[in-house]
Amino acid sequence: MQLTIITDLNKCVGCKSCQVSCKEHNTSGAFGPVPDDTPYQDPDGMWWNRILTMESGEYPNTSVLYLPKACMHCYDAPCVPVCPTGASFKREDNGVVLVDYDSCIGCQLCMWACPYGVREFDEEAGVVKKCTLCIDRIEDTTLPEHERQPACVQSCPTHARTFGDLDDPNSEVARLVAERQGFGLLPELGARPSVHYLPRRPAPSLLDAETLETAMEERY
Amino acid sequence: MRPATPLLVLTIGQGLAGGITVCLAALMWMGRLAPGEARILVLIALGTAAVGGMGSFFHMHNLKAARYVMRRLKTSWLSREALTTALFGGLLAVLAIWTVLDAAGISSAGYRIVLAITASAGFVAMWVTAMLYATIPAVLSWHTPATVLNFMLVGITSGVGLTAGWVSGAPDLWIGLAIWIPLTAVVKGLHWGHFRRAHGQIRAETGTGLPFSPYRLQDTGTSKPPYRTQTQVWPLIHPALLRIVQLWIVFWLFVVPLGGVLLWQTAGWSGGRWFLPVGALLGVIAERWLFFADATHSSRVFFVDEPRRAPQVPLTGGASRTGNPT
Ligand code: SF4
Ligand code: SF4
Ligand code: SF4
């Protein structure tokens, strides 16, 4: 089993709801981005899920791309074997890569080994932290079934994010990756990320005049 | 990559101690080392190793977990580094105690054997540390055999440089230095070439995996220099500063020691040998800082922004670039 998240880059509107809900669920508090004692500063600090904004193409054919970036829960996670204490590990039963804070010495070697820059150093605790795929939610049997998913997936207003088992060929995530040419980032570095993205279509589908007319009438 | 002070102290201290010990062993086996000189040098090596050890101590941010550090000897070069560096430090301490307490024993076969084992342990410790850096594919600048060569050569050159100040009657040492210093300079040049190529690989469009280039990064996801929580990246060094630091390294690590060797051996001025430790120390500190500060990590593709270009829309009617009325 390999649990993962698939993001449809056509649907992501860069609202950062997933970034904020991850922060709220996992890393708020004293290490928050806008702590109470200095509230008038730029948001800073630890974020396990960061949404990049990129402008692409040449004027006048430009567009904006949003790229949510968190731990890719790699099949061959390079952050795991480099860890001297065994604090970084990949779960055999569901493929989630986790950090045991009690045995992490904060050497940050795993941050260097991760090709994606998604591990973050917690200066307060002296340990490295990262996306856990909300392991506490997905394994919490007291939660209703539909809530047993990562906070970012649950909060996405456009349903751009889908959570599931990539190794199960019948799962929704496996179907999306297979049918929509899902791809992983920086494949040349050999980490085999399980997190995939669905590529943007080059242009929006064209509407004929009649459909457009009807849509406008319905709306206005 | 953020050049963390404990890492600079650790790698410089370990390299100096390893270099001094290797040099000591060579001189001892050639019969060129006086007991008084051996005593000073072993103590200097122990001192630099201890300073390096302190560096590794302060690089751990959660000391409660330090007892687990050798758990992953099978896969982690850092576990192996902890083991080999501790072994080297222990052997060096035994050697230092022997040197101080039993001056007469220095010429014995037993002492020579212990010194040879200590020097081998120092060599292995330097090699393991170098492998730790060279085997991380994500740090594009370091992922090359030149990193291993660079660590070994710079460590030994700086160690030999430090030794040369205290060894007055070692006629063979300067021959070694005259070969070793230019060799180190060539490897350093190759290494810097690799750093520049790694730097050139990083463009925003390679990070997206999508074909609609060019990409211009507008928001790095609420991260900003100096990237407090993401120490694998570091604000780019200004090209002028890079040039100055490289010139500093060439001058102190290579030109000054070679000049000292020439003054010492050809002009017969024995004071020239003090150029070597001074040059080695000032050069190696800058060399190690640049090794970290200029290293390119693959995740930089998500932090880069290509240089701003002039707007391609004609600006008229008093509109500024930002669209605000002027
Ligand atoms: S994305 Fe980075 S932190 Fe996550 S599993 Fe892969 S290498 Fe490890
Ligand atoms: S920072 Fe912690 S998790 Fe990362 S390599 Fe070091 S000990 Fe392992
Ligand atoms: S919540 Fe959904 S739409 Fe908003 S940034 Fe995240 S993935 Fe994109």
Image (tube, rainbow, N blue to C red):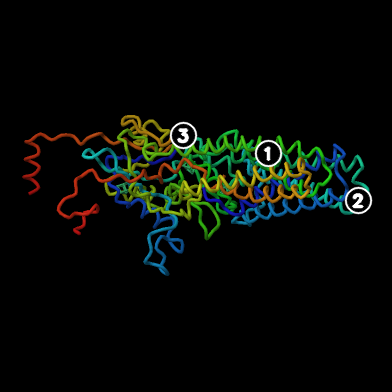
Apparent side of residue B178 relative to residue A68 in the rendered image (left or right) = right
Q: Residue at x 43, y 36 (%)?
A: A186
Dot 1 alpha-carbon crowd within 10 angstroms: few under 14, some 14 to 19, many 20 or more: many
Query: Label 2 near label 3: C-beta < 8 Å?
Result: no
Residue type at numbered disc 2: Ala
Judge by depth and name the residue closer to the eye, A192 or B286.
Answer: B286
Residue B116 visible from this viewpoint: no
1 or 2: mark nearer the eye = 1
3 or 2: mark nearer the eye = 2
Q: Which residue is mark 3?
A: A192
Dot 3 alpha-carbon crowd within 10 angstroms: few under 14, some 14 to 19, many 20 or more: some
Image location (x, y in percent) of residue A1: 46, 36
Q: Quadrant of residue A183?
A: top left
**Mark 1 C-beta to ligand 2 under 8 Å:** no
* Mark carried by residue A125: none
**Mark 2 C-beta to ligand 2 under 8 Å:** no
Dot 2 alpha-carbon crowd within 10 angstroms: few under 14, some 14 to 19, many 20 or more: few
Query: Label 2 near label 1: C-beta < 8 Å?
Result: no
Q: Secondary structure at mark 2?
A: helix
**What is the residue that sits farthest to the front in this orientation?**
B267
Q: Which residue is mark 1?
A: B181
Image location (x, y in percent) of residue B4: 57, 53
Q: Which residue is mark 2?
A: B103
Image location (x, y in percent) of residue B313: 20, 45
Q: Is residue B9 above or below residue B186?
A: below
